Structures are given as C-alpha cells and as structure tokens.
Image: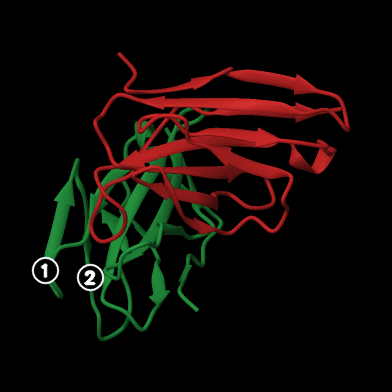
Chain colours: A green, B red
Amino acid sequence: GDSVTQTEGLVTLTKGLPVMLNCTYQTTYSPFLFWYVQHLNEAPKLLLKSSTDNKRTEHQGFYATLHKSSSSFHLQKSSVQLSDSALYFCALSIYQGGRALIFGTGTTVSVSP
Amino acid sequence: DPKIIQKPKYLVAVTGSEKILICEQYLGHNAMYWYRQSAKKPLEFMFSYSYQKLMDNQTASSRFQPQSSKKNHLDLQITALKPDDSATYFCASSHRLGGAETLYFGSGTRLTVL
C-alpha cells in the first residue's frame, strides 16, 4: 500500500549547521509530497510541497526536490536556527481522488545554541 | 482569527463515557478530515469527508463516529471511551480532496481519558 518513511526520529544539532531530513515514499500512483512542521503545542502547518519531478521547491530557507526515480523528497536547510526546533512530517498525497494525506512518523529537530 | 475552530481545547473524560469533539471551518473548503496524534502514532488519519459525504475511514473501531450537520462542520463522536483514546484530535480541511491540496489544521482537542 501507499506509505511514507522517515528514518530519523530525532535530529540534534547546533545553530548554524546544515540539516537534511530523509523522506521516501511508496505508491503506484502519481505522488504529491509535502513537508509539514509542528512547533510545540501547535497545530501542524505546511512548510512546502513538491513541484514537478527533479524541480527544487523552497520556503523559509528550507528546500526539497522530488526525485521520482528514487521515490524521495528529502528536506534540507543550509543553516538551522533555534526557531527551527520542531517536529517535521513528510506526507504523501496521490492524485487519484478520495484519499487523504498519509503522514510519515515524523522527525524531531532540536537545535541548540 | 483562527479559520478552523475546534472545541473544546482540553477535555477530560472517564472510561466508558461519551464525548463529542466539535470542528467548524471558515475557509470555504469542501473537504474535511480528522487526524489523531499520540505518542504511539504521531499523525494518524481517521476520516475524510468531501461535500459532507464520508470518503475514507481508516478507524477500526465503530466507537468513533464523524457527524457532518453542515458543509463546514465535522464533529467527532466517541463512545465507550478508553484510556487508549487519550490523544490530541486534529480537525483539518482543504479546498478539495486529494491531489496537491494543502491541509489546514485546527489547534486540536486534547483528550484525556481516566
């Protein structure tokens, strides 16, 4: 069935360092991929969503590229800030209607000074 | 102003009781959803509705019943509550179901079952 895999449960790093969060997916349909961010005690909200195959999409310093050849949509940022500490979810939507967003298990990012 | 209103924000219930979680969205969206978040399953899809019609149900238990009285309402009735039902329940909506649609989430109802 359709699924999303996030391999890191927790990523801890120091302010100013780069980060990459892994996301791979499995589906037989045409996929749309999303990254949602959830800060402590808040609701999840959209960070960015995929564009066409092999095209980079960016928002708020974060970027990701959908690679259908490897079924991946990894999230990256070149220099993390303290405010980036949050829970990050990768999510899959398929074009065939009726299906809701399928979320990965999430990666907690903890940034220290 | 919040565009998706969930009530109550916090809810404490006793085992075996029944509760209703309220959700109203003012985004003019046609699709609405319920998700559950707990330590065991970070964001678990429960139900999706499109134009007030149930489209997908991934909840194994019939104790969870969504109710859509109006296009912009999707309440969640939970009967015979169990401690395992303790979680934060998020309502969400999107312009339409599926595809590249962005989901917008409410602030959640945190349910604790004693």
Q: Are marks 1 and 2 in contact (CB under 8 Å)?
A: yes
Residue at x-position 31% and y-position 79%? A29
| Observer-nearest of B108 and B24 | B24
| Observer-nearest of A20 and B75 | B75
Residue marked by disc 2: A66
Q: Amino acid at mark 2?
A: Leu
Q: Chain of mark 2?
A: A
Disc number for residue A21: none
| Upstream in sequence: badge 1 or badge 2 | 1
Query: How far apart are labels 1 and 2 at the CA level?
Result: 7 Å
Rendering coords of residue A105 (x, y %): 54, 58
Q: Is residue A60 visible?
A: yes
Q: Amino acid at mark 1?
A: Lys
Place residue A95 in its image quadrant. bottom left
Rendering coords of residue A103 (x, y %): 46, 57
Q: Is residue B53 above or below residue A64?
A: above
Residue marked by disc 1: A55
**Both on one chain, marks 1 and 2?**
yes
